[in-house]
């Protein structure tokens, strides 16, 4: 995880209603829209910004390198954060919980517990990495640097 992404995770608390988005941010968005979007989208975007008819949604993304460390396993957004555009973060969080539940259902002691968590990681890590990366690709396709 890069430094920028760590800071974003710590500072992001919630979405902002249009009325609460700082003027300076709206000016930056307008400039970006003018530079990057053709008609008719640029006019629609500028109208939404002008009338503050928009929601500021924090986009935080985190591609995990692991989900387990010894006897600790992470699930959900604590383990991986996909951009909201994937519309899958909650779903995948539930899948984490379900798989983890299955893996530890029989063995929860000693080395067997560690192996059960490793099994959970082997079942979920690639899937959740791909999920976050799919959101990143989407952002890049919209011109995010
Ligand atoms: C704008 C937006 C749209 C989304 N749309 C979708 C969608 O359409 N479909 C979908 O599947 N997913 C969607 N998601 C993703 C989804 O909301 C998350 O992936 C999901 O909520 C993760 O669940 P979680 O339980 O892991 O974490 P959270 O829902 O973040 O729950 C963690 C909880 O822990 C609490 N907490 C944090 N720190 C502490 C502490 N120190 N002590 C006690 N409590 C603490 C928090 O207050 C919070 O209630 C969207 C996300 C966003 C931001």
Image (tube, helix red, strand yellow):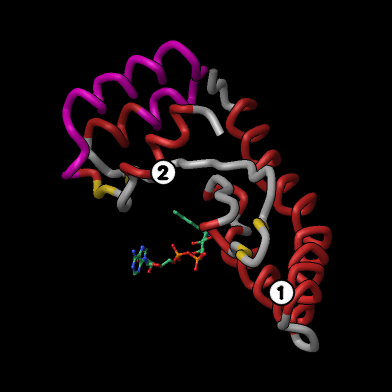
How far apart marks 2 and 1 lie (CA) works out to 24 Å
Earlier along the polypeptide chain: callout 2 or callout 1? 2
Tell me if mark 2 has few (under 14), some (14-19) or many (20+) residues whose alpha carbon lies within 10 angstroms of its own. Answer: some
Foreground of the two, 142 or 145: 145
The residue lying furthest to the top in this view is 35
The residue lying furthest to the front in this view is 110
Tell me if mark 1 has few (under 14), some (14-19) or many (20+) residues whose alpha carbon lies within 10 angstroms of its own. Answer: many
Q: What secondary structure is the magenta-colored segment mainly?
A: helix
Q: Is residue 52 above or below residue 118?
A: above
Q: Can you give x and y, in whole percent of width and height, for residue 21 in the image?
A: 21, 38
Foreground of the two, 89 or 106: 106
Horizontal arrangement in the rendering, residue 17 relative to residue 123 (left or right): left
Which residue is rendered at x = 76% and y = 87% of the image? 105
Q: Magenta residues? A: 19-45
Q: Can you give x and y, in whole percent of width and height, for residue 104 in the image?
A: 74, 80
Which residue was labeled with disc 2? 9
Q: Quadrant of the C terminus?
A: top right
Which residue was labeled with disc 1? 100
Horizontal arrangement in the rendering, residue 20 relative to residue 139 (left or right): left
Horizontal arrangement in the rendering, residue 5 relative to residue 140 (left or right): left
């Amino acid at each position: 995880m890069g430094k920028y992404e760590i800071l974003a995770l710590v500072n992001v608390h919630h979405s902002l209603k249009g009325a609460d988005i700082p003027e300076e941010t709206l000016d930056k968005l307008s400039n970006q829209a003018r530079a990057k979007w053709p008609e008719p989208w640029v006019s629609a975007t500028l109208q939404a910004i002008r009338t503050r008819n928009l929601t500021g949604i924090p986009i935080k993304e985190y591609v995990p390198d692991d989900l387990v460390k010894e006897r600790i396993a992470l699930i959900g957004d604590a383990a991986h954060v996909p951009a909201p555009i994937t519309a899958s973060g909650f779903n995948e969080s539930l899948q984490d919980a379900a798989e983890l539940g299955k893996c530890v259902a029989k063995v929860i002691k000693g080395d067997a517990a560690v192996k059960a968590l490793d099994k959970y990681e082997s079942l979920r890590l690639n899937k959740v990495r791909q999920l976050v990366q799919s959101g990143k690709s989407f952002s890049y396709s919209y011109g995010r640097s």
